[in-house]
Image (cartoon, helix red, strand yellow):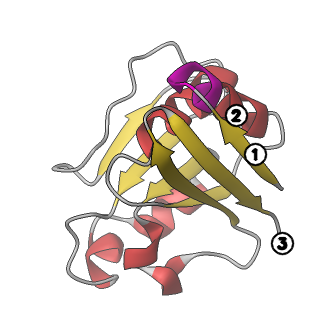
C-alpha cells in the first residue's frame, strides 16, 4: 500500500492507522533518510496504541520505551556498527516482552527482523510531502 501525505499531521495519522493493525509482539521496520518523517510516523503509532508520551528519536540511546495498554519499544539504528549491538542490549528480550517494536533505520540491521515484520518506507518529496509505502508479509 502506498499513500502520500502533505503535512506532519497526515504522516502522523498514517502511523495511527497502521497501529490499528498491530498486536503485541509485532515488529515494524522503518526505512528512510534523515528528514523522511520516521519519528513523526512513530508518534502516530504511539498515539494509536494509546500512548500519550512525547515521542522522540532514541538516536543516542538506541531504544526508548513507552508504556501503554500495548507497550511500544522504539529503536533507532542510525548509529549502530553491526547487528550484534542490538543483541547486546537485549533485542531478543524486547521481542518477547509483549509490546510492539518499531525500528528506525532498519536497513542498518536487515538480518534481525522476523519474517512477518511490517516494512515501512518513508520518502521526503520536498516540504511536508511524504511518500509512505507499507509492505505486509
Q: Is residue 8 left or right of residue 18?
A: left
Q: Residue furthest top?
A: 52
Q: Which residue is mark 2?
A: 14
Farthest residue to the left: give it.
Answer: 60
Q: Which residue is mark 1?
A: 3
Q: Horizontally, is 86 left or right of 9 in the view?
A: left
- Judged from this view, the residue extending furthest toward the front is 126
Query: Do the CB atoms of the residues marked 3 and 2 lie less than 8 Å apart?
Result: no
Left or right: 57, with 17 as reference point: left
Range of residues picked out in magenta:
7-12
- What is the spatial separation of the Cα atoms under label 3 and label 2, in whole angstroms? 18 Å
Confirm whether residue 26 shows in the render.
no
Callouts 1 and 2 close, C-beta under 8 Å: yes
Q: Which residue occupies the foreground of this view, 19 or 38?
A: 38
Residue 22, horizontal then vertical, whole percent: 77, 44
Q: Is residue 28 magenta?
A: no
Q: Which label sits in the foreground, 3 or 2?
A: 2
Residue at position x 50%, y 28% from top?
Answer: 43
Residue 28 shows in the view? yes
Mark 1 or mark 2, earlier in chain? 1
Q: Is residue 4 above or below residue 1?
A: above
Question: In the rendered structure, are the residues bearing label 3 and label 1 in contact, judged by CB atoms less than 8 Å apart?
Answer: no
Amino acid at each position: 500500500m502506498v499513500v502520500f501525505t502533505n503535512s506532519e499531521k497526515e504522516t502522523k495519522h498514517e502511523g495511527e492507522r497502521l497501529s490499528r493493525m498491530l498486536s503485541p509482539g509485532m515488529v515494524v521496520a522503518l526505512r528512510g533518510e534523515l528528514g523522511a518523517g520516521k519519528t513523526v510516523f512513530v508518534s502516530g503509532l504511539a498515539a494509536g496504541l494509546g500512548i500519550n508520551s512525547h515521542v522522540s528519536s532514541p538516536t543516542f540511546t538506541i531504544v526508548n520505551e513507552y508504556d501503554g495498554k500495548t507497550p511500544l519499544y522504539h529503536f533507532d539504528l542510525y548509529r549502530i556498527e553491526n547487528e550484534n549491538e542490538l543483541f547486546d542490549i537485549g533485542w531478543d528480550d524486547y521481542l518477547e516482552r509483549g509490546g510492539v517494536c518499531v525500528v528506525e533505520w532498519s536497513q542498518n540491521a536487515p538480518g534481525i527482523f522476523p519474517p512477518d515484520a511490517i516494512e515501512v518506507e518513508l520518502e521526503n518529496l520536498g516540504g511536508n510531502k511524504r511518500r509512505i509505502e507499507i509492505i505486509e508479509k
